[in-house]
Image (spheres, rainbow, N blue to C red):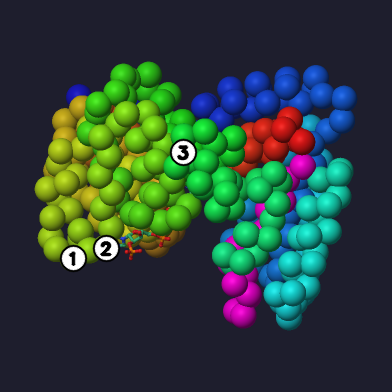
Amino acid sequence: MSAQLLEGKAIAASIKEALKKKIASFKEKPKLVSIQVGENTSSAVYIRAQKKTAEALGIEYGLKTLGADTKQDTLVTEIKSLNKDNSVSGIIVQLPLPKGIDHRLIIRSISPAKDAEGMHPENLGHVLLGDASVAPCTAQAAFELIESTRENLYGKEAVIVGHSEIVGKPLALLLLNSFVTTTVCHIATGERGVLPEHVKRAEILVVAVGKAGLIKGEWIKPGAIVIDVGINRVGERIVGDVEFEPAKDRASFITPVPGGVGPLTVTMLMRNVVTAFKLS
Ligand code: NAP
């Protein structure tokens, strides 16, 4: 039996529709300001997608471009001035930042109330406590896709491969808050040779590593929900971290790559901005 595809675009469309209605009911419009330091091709793609989505929803989008030689203190000063600006609801600093700028310090200098990416330690603390208003966008996108299956998550076995700050760790907390029994695998799991063992018992599998074909199709537990966050360029193609075709024959739900998690991530960013606006 072939798995049902979890298409991020369709789920994003219904969330965007609801956000658009909500924004239309506000007297003032939320505003997202994006800061880009230096030139970066991948940031340029994200910025275009953010601007297009924001404007389609009725969120004002401002872009501040700073030179590649910008000093850390200058960037912090810029952020502090946006923190004080009442017309700004959300701030996002595009990563990667040039060498010499500490990205953790930069994220900490954004007001937690304007933290569009949900990466400020205070907001991550609320994710841990289970009472977060905003949360990291990619982790939320993966969680939305899992919820979209309408499966009962209570007590299910989830395995997350990858423990990054933006995906694996916050997603583990979101799943724990929903009473999912959650295991997080990382490089040491792979090096110890026990990754297949963990993956084989996953009723919910989320992979966020960035290595094409890391997860073999034959490891997928029959009937599993498979969320592939990975984005890898192989020749002309973009593929995930899971061997898609054989995995699709075993899973009950699976995300395509591209077209699964990606389209939802920017929608989660806009949802965070709307939440920040409502709370301000
Ligand atoms: P990251 O920070 O590099 O994290 C990768 C994780 O994978 C790390 O925890 C790493 O462990 C772990 N890992 C590496 N090799 C492993 C192995 N052989 N077995 C088990 N775990 C292993 O990457 P990221 O930012 O989370 O992104 C992960 C992937 O998702 C990338 O392909 C990225 O492009 C994609 N992504 C997609 C979206 C989207 O919207 N669709 C958004 C963000 C990221 P160690 O840290 O211990 O080495």
Quickly name the residue at label 2.
187
Q: Residues within 10 Å of mark 3 (few under 14, many from 20)?
A: few
What amino acid is found at the position of numbered circle 3 in the picture?
Leu
187 displayed left or right of 134: left
What x and y, as percent, mark residue 12?
56, 30
Position of the N terminus by quadrant: top left
Which secondary structure, mark 3?
A: helix
Quarter of the view holding residue 181: top left
Q: Does ligand 1 reach within 8 Å of label 2's beta carbon? A: yes
Magenta-colored span? 89-102
- Can the viewer see residue 44? no
Task: Give the Cα distance between marks 3 and 1.
Answer: 32 Å
> In the image, 206: left or right of 139?
left
Give the amino acid at mark 1. Glu
Disc 1: which residue: 191
Mark 3 — residue? 129
User: Mark 1 touching mark 2, by CB under 8 A?
Assistant: yes
Identify the mark at residue 62; answer none if there is no mark. Answer: none
Does the Cβ of the disc 1 residue fall within 8 Å of ligand 1? Answer: yes
Q: Position of residue 109 (x, y in %)?
A: 68, 60
Q: Quadrant of ligand 1?
A: bottom left
